[in-house]
Amino acid sequence: PNPNIHSAISSKAKGDEEKLAVGLATLHEEDPTFVYRVDSEIKQTIISGQGELHLKVSTERLKRRFNLEIDLARPKVPYRETINGKGEAKYRHKKQSGGAGQFAEVWMRIEPKQRGEGVEFSQSLVGQNVDRIFVPSVEKGVMASCKDGMLAGCKVVDLKVDFYDGKMHPVDSKDVAFQMAGKMAFREAFMAAHPCLLEPIMNIDVKVPEDYMGDIMGDISGKRGKILGMDSEGSFQVIKAQVPQAELYNYATTIRSLTGGRGLHSEEFSHYEKMPKDLESKVIAAKTKKDEE
């Protein structure tokens, strides 16, 4: 059976992270069906188990044996950010204060790439406007923005960045100035290039007795899912579908209640695709609200 009830876990007390890590490792060693992983993209530790009861019992053991106060939360969905069109920006970073000044100007163009191609950084500088020594600085600035995201704090993917010109100052231009200018030029170009959010889509297989087919299929279409096909396995039917990950939180519980405990499912990642605009706005609004708090 695959562990398919997931929860995000964290320690309430700052400084208990180490204790939590030891506790999770110990539980997994004693019970291999209790699984955990640290997800660097959504910055959460995710625990998975065979069902709600299994997770509940496991977290109780964790609290008792390791004397931990813990918080459980709904795992974040790893949305991603990309662009639909082309964008460009010319950004000048200038700081004159007591002591050393900073100066850098970066001219940049960006365009979309195919799904799954990642971020490509290139330079097409000609002439002597910008010393090539600053190219890695601009790239560093761009990559920092890609990691933090600009729409909703999600990883940026699938675009090409071209640093094609700029200006420098013989004294005030330095690595940090070009990093900053690279970061801000990229941000401006990105926002001008019709940015959008992508969401992860999962492949699911649901195995249920024939009588429950209609209910399960209705539930899948209510979750913005697409039915891909069916197979029969003895007196069971296997429904194959694709459903957005955002709709699958505690899906095992839904199946259990729809089938009186006689259904099973498995899920695995398939691909990323563009989100409906109304849902995209909700995700962006939630991030903005969190930032303000």
Image (tube, rainbow, N blue to C red):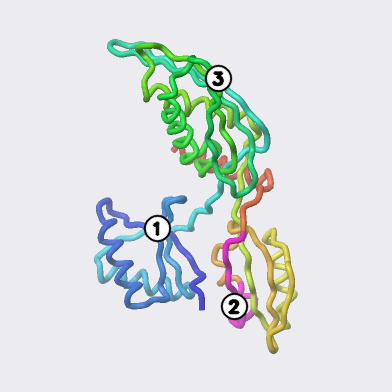
User: Which residue is farthest bottom?
Assistant: 234
The residue lying furthest to the front in this view is 127
Circle 3 SS class: strand
Q: Which residue is mark 1?
A: 38
Magenta stretch: includes residue 104: no
Q: Position of residue 265 (x, y in %)?
A: 59, 74
Say if 190 sits above or below 216 in the image.
above
Mark number, residue 119: none
Horizontally, is 197 left or right of 138 in the view?
A: right
Label 2: how many Cα within 10 Å (few below 14, some 14–19, many 20+): some
Query: Taking 239 as reference, is 221 above or below it?
Result: above
Q: Residues within 10 Å of mark 1 (few under 14, many from 20)?
A: some
Q: Is-magenta flag for residue 259?
A: yes
Query: Measured along the vertical axis of the image, is residue 32 above or below residue 245?
Result: below
Measured Cα–Cα span from mark 3 to mark 2: 55 Å
Measured as percent of width and height from the top left, residue 257 is found at 60, 75
Q: Which mark is residue 90?
A: 3
Q: Tell me the SS state at disc 1.
A: strand
Residue 169: image x %, image y %? 41, 12
Q: Earlier in the sequence, mark 1 or mark 2?
A: 1
Could you say which quadrant of the image residue 49 lies in?
bottom left
The magenta-colored residue range is 255-270
Whether tag 1 and tag 2 are in contact, CB under 8 A, the answer is no
Q: Nearer the viewer, mark 3 or mark 2?
A: 3
Q: What whole-number distance in Å separates the C-alpha atoms at marks 3 and 1?
A: 38 Å
At label 3, the amino acid type is: Lys
- Of the two numbered discs 3 and 2 on the same chain, state the one appearing first in sequence: 3
Q: Which residue is mark 2?
A: 264
Q: Is residue 115 left or right of residue 28?
A: right
